[in-house]
Amino acid sequence: MVFDGLRHLMYQLKRQALTVYCVARHRCTPWLVRLLALMIAAYAFSPIDLIPDFIPLLGMLDDLIIVPLGLALVIRLTPVRVLCESRDKARAIAEKPVSYSAAAAVLVVWVLVAIVAVRWVSALI
């Protein structure tokens, strides 16, 4: 029961972050709000945190404070029309199916690029 509530909360947080990303890409968003929205969306989706998650309590606390406050600030500063259009676009993006085979293909390409880069750098040394 508790996990269902937590799962729903995380889903809502992800959807709001996706909305903020769409706000950052909207052409009618003021440039200062666009910059803030881009920074908040990048922080929300980035695997790199201000405080690493392996630090007990503090690692998760920054995600529980910085991201929701940043999302709330961007949503408050965004014009209503832009926010409505961005929510619709985020909903459409979230409903698209996920392709795990495409993700695996991209991962294989990145691993191959990394192997080639390491061999190239080792040949130079």
Image (cartoon, rainbow, N blue to C red):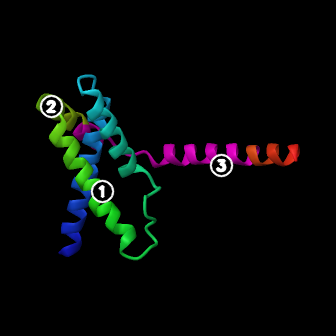
* Badge 3 amino acid: Val
Residue 65 in picture, x, y percent from top left? 27, 61
Q: Is residue 69 left or right of residue 84?
A: right
Residue 13 in view in this figure = yes
Q: Which mark is residue 89?
A: none
- The CA span between labels 2 and 1 is 22 Å
* Pick the front one: 5 or 71: 71
| Circle nearer the N terminus (3, 2) | 2
- Discs 1/3, front: 1
* Pick the front one: 58 or 11: 58
Q: Secondary structure at mark 1?
A: helix
Q: Is residue 117 left or right of residue 123?
A: left
Q: Main secondary structure of the magenta part?
A: helix
Tell me what residue is drawn at x 18 percent, y 38 percent: 77
- Discs 3/2, front: 2
Residue 100 lies in the magenta stretch: yes
Q: In this view, which residue lies farthest toward the front?
A: 32
Tell me what residue is drawn at x 24 percent, y 27 percent: 29
Q: Which mark is residue 66?
A: 1
* Badge 1 amino acid: Ile
Q: Which residues are magenta?
A: 90-116
- The CA span between labels 3 and 2 is 42 Å
- Above or below residue 17? Residue 33 is above
* Pick the front one: 59 or 5: 59
Residue 45 in picture, x, y percent from top left? 39, 50
Q: Secondary structure at mark 2?
A: loop
Mark 1 surroundings within 10 Å by alpha-carbon count, few (fewer than 14), some (14 through 19), many (20 or more): some
Which residue is tagged 2? 79
Which residue is tagged 3? 111
Q: Secondary structure at mark 3?
A: helix
Q: Quadrant of the N terminus?
A: bottom left
Q: In this view, which residue lies farthest toward the left?
A: 80
